[in-house]
Image (cartoon, rainbow, N blue to C red):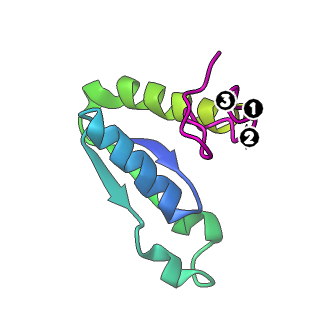
Amino acid sequence: MKLVYTHENPIMVNNIKNILAQAGVETLLRNEFSQAGLGEIPAFDTWPELWVIEPLQYEKAQQLVEAIKQQHNAPAWFCTQCHEENDGSFEICWQCQHEREE
């Protein structure tokens, strides 16, 4: 097993877990409930961790995680249909559901 992703927010880790599962990558979630020990355990040691079970799937998982991180850091864009500003990670306008144009 290899660690592919960790984050202080369990929602982020579970989101990545779901995306990897859709891509056929089998994972294991560790430290899911360890935040209850915060104070007794250092903060970074309580972060949820996502591990890839099959070593041959690790590279695929890593590429998917990197692609997700890049989408998250993408600049905001304006819809050509309704001119609403959208977060860079959106592929469809939240206001009018028009697809993003490059």
Q: Is 21 drawn above or below residue 100 in the view shown? A: below
The quadrant in which the C terminus is found is: top right
Residue type marked 3 = Gln
Residue 14 at what x, y percent from top left? Answer: 41, 56
Q: How far from the left and from the top, in percent, is residue 45? A: 55, 65
Numbered disc 3: secondary structure? loop
Q: Is residue 33 magenta?
A: no
Type of amino acid under label 1: Phe
| Range of residues picked out in magenta | 78-102
**Cα–Cα span, label 1 and label 2:** 5 Å
Residue found at x 49% / y 64%: 10
What residue is rendered at 58% in x and 84% in y? 40
Q: Under tag 1, what secondary structure?
A: strand
Q: Is residue 17 above or below residue 82?
A: below
Instruction: Classify 10 Å Cα crowding around label 2: few (below 14), some (14-19), many (20 and above).
Output: few
> In this image, 27 relative to 3: left or right?
left
Among the 4 quarters of the image, the one containing residue 52: top left
Please give the label number shown on residue 22: none
| Labelled pair 3, 1 in contact (Cβ < 8 Å) | no
Q: Residue 33, relative to residue 80: is it above or below?
A: below
Q: Which residue is mark 3?
A: 81
Residue 87 percent across, percent down from the top left: 69, 41
How far from the left and from the top, in percent, is residue 100? Answer: 60, 26
Which residue does the image show at 49% across and 45% down from the upper left?
A: 5
**Which residue lies most toward the top here?**
102
Instruction: Identify the residue shown where x is 62% and y is 72%.
Output: 42
Pointer 1 with pointer 2, Cβ within 8 A: yes
Drawn side of residue 101 relative to residue 62, left or right: right
The majority secondary structure of the magenta stretch comes to loop
Q: Amino acid at mark 2?
A: Glu
State the residue position of label 1: 78
